[in-house]
Amino acid sequence: MQTYDLAVVGTGGIAAVHARGIADLGGRARVSAVVDVDDRRLREFTAHLADLGLPEPHGYASLEEMLTAERPDLVDLCTPPGLHAPQAVMCLSRGLTVLCEKPPALSLAEFDRISAAAQAGGGHFATVFQHRFGSGARTLAALAADGRLGAPMTAVCHTLWHRPDAYFEVPWRGRWDVEGGGPTMGHGIHQMDLLLSVLGPWREVVAVAARQARPTDTEDLSCAIVTFESGAVASVVNSLLSPRETSHLRFDFGHATVELTHLYGYGDADWTVTAAPGHAEAVEAAWAAGPKGQASGHGAQLAAVLDALDAGQEPPVGTAAARATMELIAAVYQSAFTGRPVARGEIGPGSPFYDRMQGTGAPWPAVRALGGAR
C-alpha cells in the first residue's frame, strides 16, 4: 500500500476536520507539510496532528516556500475562499494534484482560470463535496441513473442554518470580494451539489435573494426554482436565519420518494425511502442492494481521492462537476439581481456575473468597508 504525502495549506477549523479524516485512512496518507502565515496556529495544528497519531510535518509560512522545498502527492487547500484560485493555480502550474475546500473559487471566471491551469500544467483539481460519498448518496445516484426509481418529478433542497451576527466578525465573512457570496455560495453549496449529482444537468433557474437581518454585504437568504433537463423541478432554499437548523433533501420519482434530513453530515439512518403503491417490493430490494455503512464526510472523500491516485485517474469531484455547481450558484444570483430567468450556459465572458457572483451589484447598500469594519 502506497502512503501519500499531503500538504495542508491553512490550519483553521476545517483543516482540523481534514486531519481527522486523514488519520482515519489507516496509513494511506500522512501530512508531510503544513502551511500557515500564523506561526502560533501552525504549531497548534502540528500538535493536533500529534494527538491524532500522525507524524510531525515540516512547517512553512507560505505556499511558495513549501512548493520550493517539497513536491507533495496532494495539496489540500483549507484556506479562506479568496485564496483558493491563486493558490490552486500556483500548485497546478507545477503539475500537482489539488483538493480544495468549497467554494473552489469566487467566480466562474476564477474557476475557469483554475481549469486552464490544470490543463496546461498537467495537474488535477478536485473540490471538497463530501456529501457525494456517503453510501446513501451513492445508492441514490445509481438508482436515479439506471431508472429503477422511475422518472424524476420534483425535489426539495433546503439548507436552513443559523449564523448569529458574531459569526461575521471574522473579516472575510459576509463580503463579496473575499467570500464570494452568502449562504448560496458558502453553505448551501454542499446540498446543491448533491442535488445536481442525483438529478443531472439543470436547464433554467428563477430566484430571489435578500439580506434580511445579518450585518453582511452578501445575502443571508435565497430561494430558487430550478428546472432540470429531465423536466424535474426543484425548490432550493439557502438560509442563515433559521433557529431550528436542518439540511433537507427530498427527491420524488415516479416509483418512490427518497428523503435525507441531517445537518452537517449524514449516515444510513438519516435516509427515508417511501415506495409508490405497487412498487414497494422492487424499490425496497433496489435500495437494500446498494452500499451501506459509509457516512458522508471528509474521510470518505479523501479515501475516494486516494483510490483515484492509486488508479492513476482524475480524483472526484473534478472540474466539470464542480463547475456545474458553481454555474448554478452564479445563475441564482443573476436571476435574483436581474429579476428574470437564467438558462444554463448563459453566463460567460462578458457577463458581469461571470466575473463576480454579485454581477451588477446587490440591490441593497453595502455595510462593510473593504477592511472588514462595519
Image (spheres, rainbow, N blue to C red):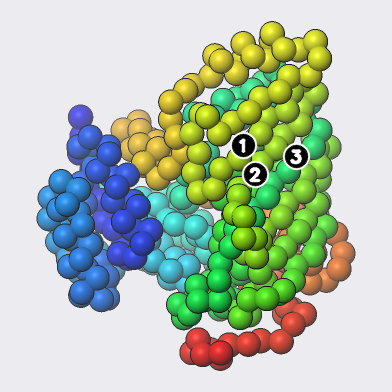
The reply to whether the C-beta atoms of the residues labelled 3 and 2 are less than 8 Å apart is no
Q: Tell me, for residue 155, which label it has, or none.
A: 3
Q: Residue at x 15, y 46 (%)?
A: 53
From the top left corner, tell me how far across and down residue 271 is, in percent.
59, 31
Q: Nearer the viewer, residue 362 or 327?
A: 362
Q: Quadrant of the C terminus?
A: bottom right
Amino acid carrying label 2: it is: His
Amino acid carrying label 3: it is: Ala
Q: Is residue 65 left or right of residue 136?
A: left
From the top left corner, tell me how far across and down residue 102 is, in percent.
49, 57
- Mark closer to the chain start, 3 or 2: 3
Q: Is residue 251 left or right of residue 106?
A: right
Amino acid carrying label 1: it is: Leu
Disc 3 crowd rating (10 Å Cα; few below 14, some 14-19, many 20+) is: many
Residue on which the image places disc 2:
248
Residue 265 visible from this viewpoint: yes
Disc 1 crowd rating (10 Å Cα; few below 14, some 14-19, many 20+) is: many
Name the element at disc 2: strand
Front of the two marks 3 and 2: 2
The reply to whether the C-beta atoms of the residues labelled 1 and 2 are less than 8 Å apart is yes
Name the element at disc 3: strand
Residue 324 visible from this viewpoint: no
